[in-house]
Image: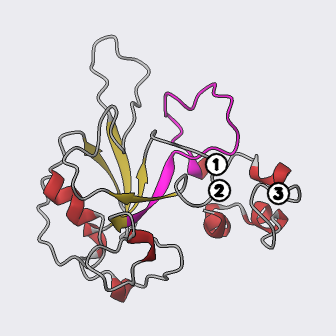
Amino acid sequence: MVATLPFAEASTLFQQLDLSTAWDGEANRGTVQADVSMYVCPVHMDWNGRDAIGFTTYIGIAGLGADAGDLPNDHPRAGFFGYTRQVTRRDIADGLGNTIAVMETMADNGPWAAGGWPTLRWVDGNESDFVGAGQPFGARHKTDTFFRSNPVVANAAFADSSVRTLPSAVDATVFRALVTIAGAEQVRTDF
């Protein structure tokens, strides 16, 4: 997420970071505690009034499997983000509108500057439930539930710049296909 700061209208924050030292080192301590509004869902119920600083509710999707962040771009399990890979439009063979880049989560959240698990996640291809209470992705968003339910849903930013809400009932096969860039799966649009 540090590398995306200039694109999140936080260029000044990016320039204040000492990239030659650890994210939580003394030189960066004050800077990494800053809240970056684009890294947090503004209506997230667990965000309001929290004590944590420098927190994120969004993470980059690395693909399928624990080694997904290290896979090459053309690997069928590779996702939009990796530890060292750089993805171009040509690399997204599954289609920009069929590829999740960023997903909302309330599981194991952490600082936006930390890197690793707090900001980049792989998806366990053996799971069948991905969005919901106690699942890897999703959150409750409504504060007024007097006459309505308050289901857990997950906001997802796709590679085509669209943002869609995925319900807890998202089909597992479709979800697994959406988190890869070159898996060559057929994706139903009724997820």
Q: Residue furthest bottom?
A: 90
Look at mark 3 in the image and give the residue it sits on: 25
Q: CA distance from mark 1 to mark 2?
A: 5 Å
Q: CA distance from mark 2 to mark 3?
A: 11 Å
Look at mark 2 in the image and give the residue it sits on: 114
Q: What kind of residue is marked 2?
A: Ala
Q: Residue at x 54, y 56 (%)?
A: 119
Where is residue 109? Give x, y as percent. Answer: 53, 43
Residue 91 occupies which quadrant of the picture?
A: bottom left
Q: Residue at x 26, y 83 (%)?
A: 93
The answer to whether residue 80 of the structure is visible from this angle is no
**SS for callout 3:** loop
Q: Residue at x 22, y 43 (%)?
A: 129
User: 5 above or below 169?
Assistant: below
Magenta span: chief secondary structure = loop
Disc 2 crowd rating (10 Å Cα; few below 14, some 14-19, many 20+) is some
Tag 1 and tag 2, C-beta contact below 8 Å: yes
Disc 1 crowd rating (10 Å Cα; few below 14, some 14-19, many 20+) is many
Residue 156 counted in the magenta span: no
